[in-house]
Amino acid sequence: MRWALIKAAVAGTTMVALAFLIPLGLMVQQTARDHAFTAAERQAAALGPALAITTDQIAIDRALASTDAGGQGRMAVHLPAPAAPAAPDALPGAGGPGGPTIGEARAAAGDVSTAGGQGRSFTVEVPGGYALLQPVAVDTGRTAVVEVFVADGDLTRGVSTAWLVLSGVALGLVAISVLVADRMGGRIVASARRLAGAARSLGAGNLAVRVPVDGRQAAGSPEELREAAHAFNTMADRVVQLLAAERELAADLSHRLRTPLTVLRLNAASLGEGDAADATRHAVSQLEREVDQIIRSARRDPEDAPAVAVGCDVAEVVRERVGFWSALAEDEGRRWQLAGADRATPVPVQRADLAATVDALLGNVFRHTAVGTAFSVDVLATETSVIVLVGDAGPGFSDPAAALKRGEGHGGEGSTGLGLDIVRKLAESTGGDLALGRSAVLGGAEIRLRLRTRPDGIPARAGRRRSRGALFQK
């Protein structure tokens, strides 16, 4: 934008300068020409009184020498023919329209005769310039012609200097316009950059950023950019209000779950002993902890959130969650197996988020396959990522692409449609992805979750996949 304004200023100022300076330069050139011929006419008129008094060649020669043009050899007088025979001691002349010529003549005899015969002055072109022929009546019936030579240099005297001055003025005007455009462009660009920087900062999560619309920083900004800054500030305030309302809503909904959770906890406590009762009580306790965490996170201001180290061990989380679901698998007669979770595989995600993701994957197996359907969980580590494979022996996905769109609310019966969407967002937050396919071993559905490891971490060594057949359990 800055360079565009400078280019526009240069183009506009140049056109204006040329529109005014070129005619002015031509006028100066014409003025110099008129001045040269006017000076020649004054020189010719200076001999009029002398010619009106006498035509004596000696007297005329002295009068001619007293003028500037005559002293420089640029003036001549063509005398008329004498009324009586010339005296024997008369000065010889070079000839003229009927009489001698005094001084250095340059005009042709025909032009001199024409000027004397017509009685009017005019100029003729001669070698090196022009000759002004001025007729002067000396007495009745006789006319002398005064010739003044005007050199070409006299016609252009001062014109070059005038063109240089005018060119300097034009360049000065262009330079001033560039400085003004650069100053204005700098203010506009600075305002636009402040607005862009605030937008990037807001996109990065800084909800307190605002663009100044008044004061020194906003001084000189165009009205349109100030309006855009005001609109941005209004939008940012609205975003803060919406996020606050969302946190309040999440906290309120989570708080409403406390009453049914209390009932579940009391009922679970009365179940007695047994694996199913222990698993139920464990699930209720975990659900209560998650609800409390949601309430705390919703009530906490994002700007006051403590900086915590993000990262967990995939193998450890997978072992814990598969162990939790194994109790339900044994009750339903499902064979299951876990492979590759025997070595540390760190990933840049929070433990609670990864645990919720694994629960969503395993919960889909129990929810969408028949009782007794086998499933498997594999953990594979590469140098750049960690892959979690969850497969089953069910019917598989009839339309994998549609299944990935369940997060938009198109889930089946008994499904909120958010399970795979939660998994996908976690994978994309690390630069990974989520893919659906068919299990090559069990023949049913297989979900591949790929999590990229942190860039500055130590590359993980690829783990070896265990044989599946020996790890199936009842």
Image (tube, helix red, strand yellow):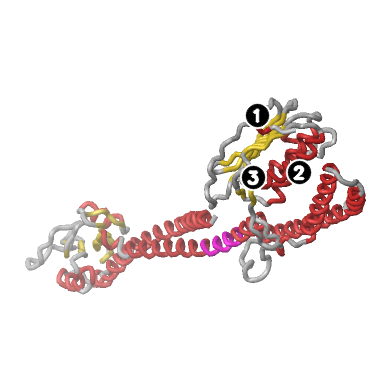
Q: Which of marks 2 and 3 is nearer the N terminus?
A: 3
User: Pointer 2: what residue?
Assistant: 324
Q: Earlier in the sequence, mark 3 or mark 1?
A: 3
For the question of whether residue 399 can be seen, the reply is: no
Residues under labels 3 and 1: Cα distance? 20 Å
Q: Position of residue 305 (x, y in %)?
A: 71, 62
- The residue at 42%/64% (across/down) is 169
Quadrant, the N terminus: bottom right
Residue 454: which numbered mark, if any?
none
- The residue at 50%/55% (across/down) is 3
Give the magenta-colored segment's residue range: 182-192
Residue 469: which numbered mark, if any?
1
Q: Is residue 291 magenta?
A: no
Q: Where is residue 253 in the image (x, y as percent from the top left)?
A: 86, 52
Disc 3 on helix, strand or loop? helix
User: Pointer 3: what residue?
Assistant: 315
Residue 52 sits in which quadrant? bottom left
Residues under labels 2 and 3: Cα distance? 14 Å
Relative to 123, is 401 on the left or the right? right
Q: Position of residue 467 (x, y in %)?
A: 61, 31
Name the foreground residue: 202 vs 252.
252
- The residue at 26%/53% (across/down) is 125
- The residue at 39%/64% (across/down) is 168
Inspect the image, locate mark 2, and give the three-letter code of the amino acid beneath it: Phe
Inspect the image, locate mark 3, and give the three-letter code of the amino acid beneath it: Ala
Disc 1 on helix, strand or loop? helix
Residue 309 sits in which quadrant? bottom right
Disc 2 on helix, strand or loop? helix
